[in-house]
Amino acid sequence: MDNHIHLALNASDRSYFAILKKEIHAMAVAGGLSEKRIAELDIIVAEIVTNLVKHAGGGQVLAKLIEENGKQGIEIISIDNGPGMSDVTRMVADGVSTKNTLGHGLGAMKRLSDVFQIYSLKNWGTIILVRVFNKAPSSKAFKTEIRSVIIPKPGETASGDDFFSIVDKDYVKLFLGDGLGHGPEAAKAMQVAGAAFMECPYTDPVEIIRYINVAVKRTRGMVGTVAVFDLASRKWRICGVGNIITKVCSAGNSKNYLTYNGIIGLNVPNTLSAQEIPYEDGQYVLMTSDGLKTRWDTLKYTSIMRYDLSILCASLIKDFARLTDDMSAVACKINL
């Protein structure tokens, strides 16, 4: 089971702890994790929420089920706006504490996790990424890294934003869509669109959008962008309809892709063309829905590309979420 949508849980004070721990525990059970791994996950979650209140004055915890190379697991992301850490490596070491505790929390989390990363900036806050699998995944570096953070509008359980991807020996295909409005009907539109994307035989992003357009005509419609990387030609081809923001970033600069006006399923323009962008080493593609403010920039995040792309996505959510709609950030990096 691999869920696209993160469950967003409030950790602003201790009164939320019991609910938060119960929700993540139930998710891990539903995901088929072993009793041993669930018990270890319970410890990790307890340390995360304790640290949030003690050191950051509260925050937010995101959780979703994941699957990598056939291994079932769960992803936890902790986000706060606290004072940040000046020396993350030192703080992870056992016995180091700023609150007169034993100082074993971060070290214990690292030991119990299959993936454990901390990104922190002074006077900005901290993001902690944890992944726990039933069986440890391969340590081999992925040629293609694709990550997403998608959160429903506060108060909603269904998300009208959704993301789908296909990776094969010839192409990498990405589709981020935003069903009109929010809630169950917007989510239903995206389910139909996602199914159409996954079955679509075409590799041209224009043809893929037209294929999705036909499939979703009986839904409320959506905006969306398709990006396709051709491994043979080493080029991205991107086409979008509506207000999905797409940037291709590399070596300190970023190029914005301009989308067409319209609604997929209702009024897609007759004339569409894909924009071509050649591959560069270190290049990555970022896509966000209008649940995030449009003027986001990744240059403020010092050295963030050394980290898992989920941390980059979470950073954009942290700083630019509107909180009035479903929110999504997607990142893809291909290493050739």
Image: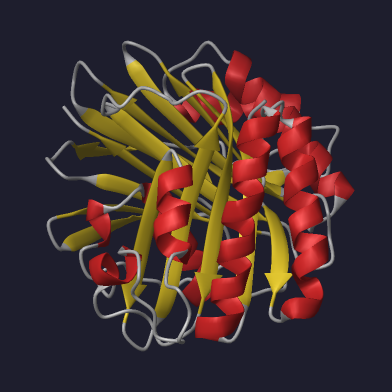
Q: Position of residue 248 (x, y in %)?
A: 28, 50
Nearest the eye: 150 or 231: 150
Relative side of 252 to 97, left or right: left
Relative side of 264 to 92, left or right: right
Up-down relation of residue 155 to residue 248 (above or below): below
Locate the C terminus by quadrant. top left
Q: Residue at x 48, y 76 (%)?
A: 319
Locate the N terminus by quadrant. top right
Q: Residue at x 50, y 83 (%)?
A: 55
Res 195 visible: yes
Q: Please name the colour scheme applied to the rendered image.
A: secondary structure
Up-down relation of residue 261 to residue 93 (above or below): above
Nearest the eye: 249 or 268: 249
Nearest the eye: 233 or 1: 1
Q: Position of residue 147 (x, y in %)?
A: 45, 42
Q: Residue at x 66, y 42 (%)?
A: 39
Q: Position of residue 315 (x, y in %)?
A: 44, 66
